[in-house]
Image (cartoon, rainbow, N blue to C red):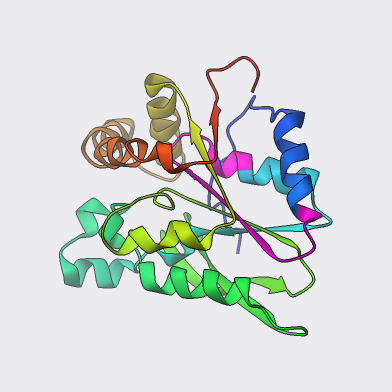
């Protein structure tokens, strides 16, 4: 089954400065967790993917999206129409995974879930993480959120990056993504306005919790 957990953002090129910064984390001598946060459509998954491509010999990507609650559970909770909001994820499950990754034992394989957009569901045991990988790149919307159950997460990360992009560009990416995965253009636009954008505004209020901000509007990107 093909994941298609995210569609890459065409045309984005990651500065060598950021690649070198992440490469130095690989050389730290211990397991390092790099968190990459950002609003929906900001390009955070693309940043994570570009970093991993450049550092394939020392990194793994572990997306937060694997901890989406199932559609069945969202229906039970009455939250399916807000899928992607902070309370539609298994925060404690994600936190437990990060804690395990920080303390992974020699010879231990840890399996992480992955979100499959083709079926709009997470699948457990999709991503194997081996003990000899020094850099774990984890990416997701709410990694720097300093409220509710998300608040303790930030302390678990060794470095925190935040990705931002111009509003209209970010929203168009989302419309394209939702349409690509089956929504009509009208439904895609409505979902972006009513669901994605309120989440995005909440996420961007917490960008000051980052150690580094990557702005795709900046020509130095």
- Please tell me which residue lies in front, 159 or 201: 159
Q: Tell me if residue 214 is in the magenta stretch.
A: no
Q: How many numbered callouts?
A: 0
Residue 63 higher or lower than 113, as above or below: above
Residue appearing at x 71%, y 84% in the figure: 108
Q: Is 89 located above or below residue 172 in the figure?
A: below
User: Horizontally, is 192 left or right of 182 in the view?
Assistant: left
| Left or right relative to 20: residue 180 | left
Left or right of 47 in this view: 173: left
Residue 16, image x, y percentages: 77, 30
Which residue is farthest left? 78
The quadrant of the rendering that contains the C terminus is: top right
* Residue placed most toward the observer, 123 or 26: 26
Q: Give coordinates of residue 66: x percent, y percent.
A: 48, 64
Of all residues, the one furthest to the right in this rendering is 57
**Magenta stretch holds residue 40:** yes
Find residue 152 and report its image quarter.
Answer: bottom left
User: Where residue 185 sits: x, y (%)?
Assistant: 33, 31
**Residue 80 place in picture, x, y as percent:** 23, 59
Q: Which residues are magenta?
A: 26-47
Residue at 62% x, 28% y is: 10
The residue sitting at 84% across, 56% down in the picture is 57
Of residues 198 and 125, the one drawn nearer to the viewer in this rendering: 198
């Amino acid at each position: 089954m093909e994941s298609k957990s995210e569609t890459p953002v065409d045309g984005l090129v990651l500065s060598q400065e950021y690649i070198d910064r992440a490469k130095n984390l690989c050389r730290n001598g211990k397991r390092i967790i790099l968190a990459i946060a950002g609003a929906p459509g900001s390009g955070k998954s693309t940043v994570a993917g570009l970093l991993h491509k450049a550092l394939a010999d020392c990194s793994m990507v572990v997306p937060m999206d694997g901890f989406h609650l199932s559609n069945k559970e969202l229906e039970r909770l009455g939250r399916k129409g807000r899928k992607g909001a902070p309370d539609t994820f298994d925060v404690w499950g994600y936190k437990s995974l990060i804690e395990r990754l920080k303390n992974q034992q020699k010879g231990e394989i840890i399996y992480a879930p992955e979100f499959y957009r083709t079926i709009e569901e997470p699948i457990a045991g999709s991503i194997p993480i081996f003990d000899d990988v020094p850099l774990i790149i984890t990416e997701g919307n709410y990694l720097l959120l300093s409220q509710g159950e998300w608040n303790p997460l930030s302390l678990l990360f060794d470095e925190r990056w935040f990705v931002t992009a111009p509003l209209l560009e970010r929203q168009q990416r989302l419309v394209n993504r939702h349409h690509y995965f089956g929504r009509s253009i009208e439904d895609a636009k409505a979902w972006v306005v009513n669901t994605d954008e309120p989440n995005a505004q909440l996420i961007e209020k917490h960008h000051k919790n980052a150690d580094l901000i990557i702005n795709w509007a900046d020509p130095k990107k």
